[in-house]
Image (cartoon, rainbow, N blue to C red):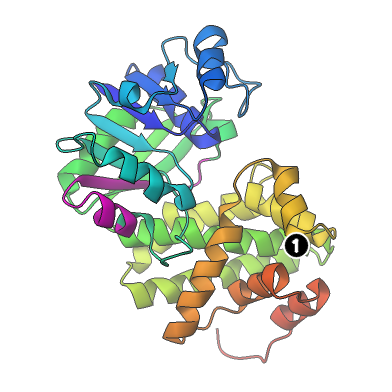
Amino acid sequence: MSLAVLGAGSFGTAVADHAARVGREVVLWCRGGDQARHINERHRNPRYLKDYPLQESLRATAVLEEALEGADRVVLALPTQSLRSVLERLAPLSPEGRSFLSLAKGIEISTGLMPHRIFEEVLPGSSYSALSGPSHAEEVVRDLPTAVIVASKDPATAVEWQKLLNAPRFRVYTSGDVVGVELGGAVKNIIAIAVGIAHSLSVGDNARAALATRGLAEIMRLGSAMGASPLTLAGLAGVGDLMATCYSAHSRNFRFGAAIGRGASADSAVSEIGQVVEGAHTVKALVAYARTKGIELPISEGVHAILYEGAVLQDVIERLLFREPKPE
């Protein structure tokens, strides 16, 4: 079965390499020709995961049409803020009959839409699924044990993706809750920024655990308002991804927060990470949505205040930790 992976960032590269490892014919679409040539000739991505060898059968191209040629399944390994523009390029390329799987974990700033809603606007009627869960690219590419979840409104489609990607060290579960899977993957990035800030302020493990746990309460609160299943958010896409993102050195959102906590500006922190930090974008859309709906999100509000309202770090963290006591 031929598979196109659109996006040669860390996770796109890792998923493409995994699919090639389990015997799929994979073409990885890169933004630039030099990157594609390097992957084809040296079997390494010169920009992301560059220390890890890739499967020799994995082929790369910088030509979108070439990546899609003969591919009946397409993985969208794109930042949420870039998803719409790439989907618009796909629209005239006969997407009918193809099945799409999104790896995006965020919310579009300009519209407040999650990835599946963007997809419905640009490619209505096409088959769509979303993958999420605790799955750092640095560990997937090393074939370390990983468990993820694929969600689709069509159960059979989720099972098809499960069969395509499942392996002994890459366990794929299925779900029908697209909203819950995408929501958990988006909001946990914001909570990880808060935990990273707290880490640099040396407030201790207890405080970090409190922030992560109350962050889960925010995810659950949002999920209830948006129709997500609590069971989804208590699983891999919610608790699982939250734990990995808040406590791993691989987490770019945690590292971004840690840089902010050390006094870096948002721009310099992003430069330090060297990759897209989805939580820094998602928090804008999420806070705007929550304010219009009257949903209380103190941690997300605190991260927004630090990044975009000039708030003092210590003041925000102390406000979060010393809020008025109430029943949990």
Please check the rendered image and state whether residue 79 is part of the magenta-colored stretch, yes or no: no
Characterize the local packing of mark 1: few (<14), some (14-19) or many (20 or more) Cα atoms within 10 angstroms: many
User: Which quarter of the figure is the N terminus placed in?
Assistant: top left
Residue 91 picture location, percent across and down: 25, 42
Residue shown at 59% from the left, 72% from the top:
300
The residue that mark 1 highlights is: 197
Instruction: Report which quarter residue 114 is drawn in.
Output: bottom left
Residue 298: image quadrant is bottom right
**Range of magenta residues:** 117-135
Q: Is residue 306 above or below residue 37?
A: below
Q: Along the horizontal axis of the image, is 266 left or right of 228?
A: right
**Which residue shows up at 78% across the image and 59% down it?**
265
* In the image: residue 199, left or right of residue 142: right
Query: Who's the residue at 39% across and 71% down the image?
Result: 223
Residue 222 vs 73, above or below: the answer is: below
**Residue 82 location in percent, x, y?**
46, 47
Label 1 element class: helix
Q: Quadrant of the C terminus?
A: bottom right
Residue at image point 37% right, 55% down: 115
